[in-house]
Image: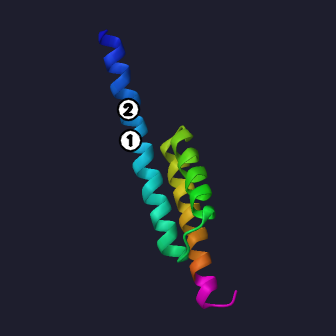
Amino acid sequence: MGSFCKSGRTIGNRAGVIGFLYTGMESGMVKARDADDIINSVVAGLAIGALYKAETVTRAIGGIAVGLAMTGKQILKRYIPI
């Protein structure tokens, strides 16, 4: 019974962290894109899945940097014709 409780806490903690990250990412995309559609949910799910499965911190930081760069480009395209 002891190992079951320990693994249950671990799985619950991971699910909670993934849920918070997903919700934050999706809300940020809604705010950045000024649109609440399916694209936000899909991209947030893909991004969180990629970050969760990243084996090293370097990959996670690189993924975040690329995501921020692409988001910045989309915001700039809205105001500056590129």
Is 8 situated left or right of 78 in this image? left
Residue at the outermost top position: 1
Secondary structure beneath disc 2?
Answer: helix
- The region drawn magenta spans 76-82
From the image, tell me which residue sits under label 1: 16
Secondary structure beneath disc 1?
Answer: helix
> To which quarter of the image does residue 77 belong?
bottom right
The residue depicted at 31 percent of the width and 18 percent of the height is 5
Category of crowding for the residue at label 1, using alpha-carbon neighbours closer than 10 angstroms: few (below 14), some (14–19), many (at least 20) = few
Whether 33 is drawn above or below 22: the answer is below
Amino acid type of the residue tagged 2 in the rendering: Gly
> To which quarter of the image does residue 33 belong?
bottom right
Q: How many marks?
A: 2
Residue 10 part of the magenta-drawn span: no
Amino acid type of the residue tagged 1 in the rendering: Gly
Residue 21 location, x and y as percent?
43, 51
Residue 79 part of the magenta-drawn span: yes
Residue 37 location, x and y as percent?
59, 67
Residue 47 location, x and y as percent?
57, 53
From the image, tell me which residue sits under label 2: 12
> Marks 1 and 2, Cα distance to the nearest angstrom?
6 Å
Q: Quadrant of the N terminus?
A: top left
